[in-house]
């Protein structure tokens, strides 16, 4: 019996390919929401420790993205939006992506635990596990509720940021979690409405594929009707000032107006594209206002003292 | 795809010169160099981060000693 060993081709993957594996656009949202959670938390965190926490959360999110691309390489190759990713294009091998993702995940969690605190590290580990094992491996290919439940992973960063600064949990970061959690379905379903052929080709049971466009439009409206009032609750519960409340009301009204247009739309996907674009602005603006509100409140009390 | 056992068979044949090892193309060399520099920079940044965090932690403990 002769034993034959296959030799792998030397890698041509560049640094940019590895950065692309980390899903930089998703990472920017994670960094921003985690930063807000970190800065609005009670107590004082040294800027160096805060930076270390944010870096670990960023790397952890990137690791989850790399592991997602590794597992989903087969379906990514079938969809126009994802066919140009490093693994389907052959620039990075699946093994390289998996090794990169696992290494970064372990590194991020252990470093966060050692440099910041164990609670934040445990939450980061849970987030990576939830995104990779629960969403990517289990839910994504098996249920139209994939992005509803899986959205929890994307909603956790503000809680990790808060836990990094305060070492504890509270109602306020849970509100931020709920805002992102209820923001995720309208955001992704708006995208899936005009990318439905991609999902059909890849065999992913997104809501428009399984339940049809009309039901998706109805559910987008329902989730938006929950999201808009939720966005205002930090002000209603006294965690934010009037400026935030006014911004949340205005942004929420715009989201509802766009969701209504999506619901009424029968031909074409103009409204769903508009809702998808605006939903990104909505979340960034809402969290930015919360930050501005808290920072300006802090400055006012500083000058008053 | 190259097979190791075939390579070894070739070595046994008298008078045959076999080029062993992998010869990287220009593109592969460039990519490897870029990856190596990125890893070096990341490790350097990590060392600096650990150094700074150590300073902060030690400094805080000097200011408020736990005796």
Image: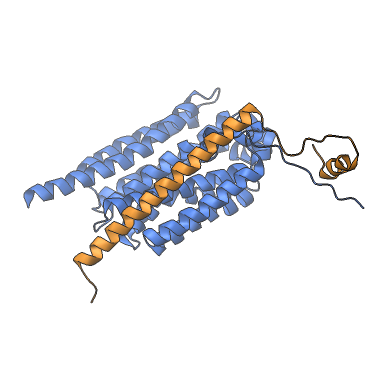
Residue A3 visible, this orientation: yes
Residue appearing at x 49%, y 54% in the figure: A107
- Residue B65 place in picture, x, y as percent: 22, 71
User: A85 or A173, which lies in front?
Assistant: A85
Query: Which chain is blue in the rendering?
Result: A
Q: Is residue A301 left or right of residue A252?
A: left
- Residue A275 place in picture, x, y as percent: 44, 31
User: B33 or A50, which lies in front?
Assistant: B33
Name, please, the residue furthest toward the bottom.
B67
The quadrant where residue A173 appears: bottom left
User: A95 or A219, which lies in front?
Assistant: A95
Residue A83 visible, this orientation: no
- Residue B51 place in picture, x, y as percent: 34, 54
Query: Which chain is orange in the rendering?
Result: B
What colour-coding does the image apply?
A: by chain
Q: Is residue B18 left or right of residue A253?
A: right
Q: Is residue A88 left or right of residue B43?
A: right
Q: Is residue B12 above or below residue A177?
A: above
Name, please, the residue furthest toward the left.
A305
Residue appearing at x 44%, y 33% in the figure: A259
User: B50 or A28, which lies in front?
Assistant: B50
């Amino acid at each position: 019996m002769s034993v034959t060993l296959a030799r792998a081709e030397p890698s041509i993957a560049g640094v940019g390919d590895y950065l692309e594996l980390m899903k930089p656009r998703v990472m920017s949202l994670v960094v921003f929401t985690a930063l807000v959670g970190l800065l609005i938390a009670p107590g004082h965190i040294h800027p160096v420790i805060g930076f270390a926490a944010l870096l670990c959360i960023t790397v952890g999110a990137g690791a989850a993205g790399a592991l997602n691309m590794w597992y989903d390489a087969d379906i990514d190759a079938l969809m126009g939006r994802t066919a140009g990713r490093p693994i389907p294009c052959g620039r990075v091998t699946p093994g390289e992506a998996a090794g990169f993702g696992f290494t970064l995940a372990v590194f991020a969690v252990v470093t966060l635990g050692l440099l910041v605190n164990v609670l934040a590290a445990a939450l980061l580990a849970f987030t990576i596990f939830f995104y990779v094992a629960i969403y990517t491996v289990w839910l994504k290919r098996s249920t139209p509720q994939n992005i509803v439940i899986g959205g929890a992973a994307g909603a956790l960063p503000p809680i990790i940021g808060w836990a990094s600064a305060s070492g504890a949990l509270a109602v306020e970061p849970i509100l931020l979690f709920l805002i992102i959690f209820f923001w995720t379905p309208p955001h992704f379903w708006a995208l899936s409405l005009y990318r439905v052929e991609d999902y059909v080709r890849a065999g992913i049971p997104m809501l428009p594929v399984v339940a049809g466009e009309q039901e998706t439009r109805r559910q987008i409206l329902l989730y938006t009707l929950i999201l808009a009032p939720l966005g205002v609750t930090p002000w209603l519960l006294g965690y934010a000032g009037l400026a935030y409340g006014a911004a949340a009301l205005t942004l929420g009204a715009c989201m509802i107006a766009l969701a209504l247009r999506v619901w009424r739309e029968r031909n074409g996907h103009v409204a769903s594209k508009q809702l998808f674009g605006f939903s990104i602005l909505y979340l960034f603006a809402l969290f930015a206002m919360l930050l501005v509100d808290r920072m300006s409140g802090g400055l006012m009390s500083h000058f008053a003292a | 795809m190259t097979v190791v056992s075939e390579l070894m068979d070739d070595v046994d044949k008298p008078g045959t010169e076999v080029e062993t090892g992998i010869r990287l193309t220009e593109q592969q060399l460039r990519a490897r160099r870029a990856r190596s520099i990125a890893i070096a920079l990341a490790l350097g940044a990590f060392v600096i981060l650990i150094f700074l965090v150590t300073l902060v932690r030690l400094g805080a403990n000097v200011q408020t000693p736990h005796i």
